[in-house]
Amino acid sequence: MISHYESVRHAALYPEAFNLTAPDPLPGRDIWPRRPAVFIRQTPATVEADIEIQPAGRELVQGQFGLTPAWAKSASDAKLRSSKLVNARPDSVVGSKHFDLAWKESRRCIVPMMAFFVDDWRTGKPVPTRIARVDGRPMGVAGLWERWGKVEGESVTGFCLLTVSSHGHGLLHRYDPPGAEKRMPVILNEGAYDAWLNAPLAKATEFMRSYPANWLTANPVEKG
């Protein structure tokens, strides 16, 4: 499970990497379940008299890490459940009590991050390890978002990361506890951001693939 990632903390990287203005304030560096963070979602096209006035675009949204199911009984219930809903498997979202609605209604998003963290168990003890792009640029990770609440009144918006198997991955097959299923987030190619947000539902699974191992680097986290 990917439950810890490093947010994008340099404002200049948002317009450069995602063509969006940086959030103000910027999110905290370390994002854990239920922590506030940002994600990118599609904005609908503006249509008047069957004429498209403004095409669909992107917007940066504040939310919490962890999907907030719409069927939860209360805001506190949604927040509590979200701590366990930080990852979703593309092969099991359909029919899932937690993720089915967000998937079928194409509530897809992109989660900006500089890195994510996994544990290296090869010594027999967990060693926190930072996984980042070799070129140091931000990652855009595929995700789903959901909003709990009514139009008026209290509401909570949360998001999760989509993950794929890393069992045969050249780098990430080394990590996670022995015997555990190995997973990695779906890191999108930069040129595929709009395609992912706008793709027809039937085409969405085509983006669910692992990121090349030679484009990633792994470094143990120094204690201190």
Image (cartoon, grey):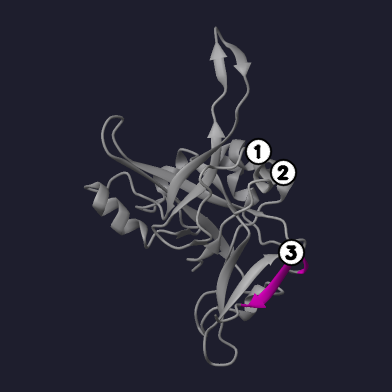
Q: Tell me which label, 3 or 2, sits earlier in the chain.
A: 2
Up/down of 167 relative to 33, above or below: below
Label 3 and label 2: CA atoms lie apart by 22 Å
- Farthest residue in the bottom direction? 124
Q: Secondary structure at mark 2?
A: helix
Q: Secondary structure at mark 3?
A: loop
Label 1 and label 3: CA atoms lie apart by 20 Å
Q: Which residues are magenta?
A: 214-220
- Dividing the picture into quadrants, the one containing residue 220 is bottom right
Up/down of 4 relative to 203, above or below: below
Check disc 2 and report the residue beneath it.
16
| 1 or 2: mark nearer the eye | 2
The amino acid at mark 1 is Asp
Residue at horizontal 67 percent and vertical 55 percent from the top:
138
Q: Find out whether residue 216 is within the magenta segment.
A: yes
Task: Tell me the quadrant of the picture where the C terminus can be found.
Answer: bottom right
Check disc 1 and report the residue beneath it.
194
Q: Secondary structure at mark 1?
A: helix
Residue at horizontal 31 percent and vertical 30 percent from the top:
151
Instruction: Return the x and y of residue 210 as percentages of the image width and height.
Output: 66, 62
- Farthest residue in the top direction? 49
Res 212 label: 3
The amino acid at mark 2 is Glu
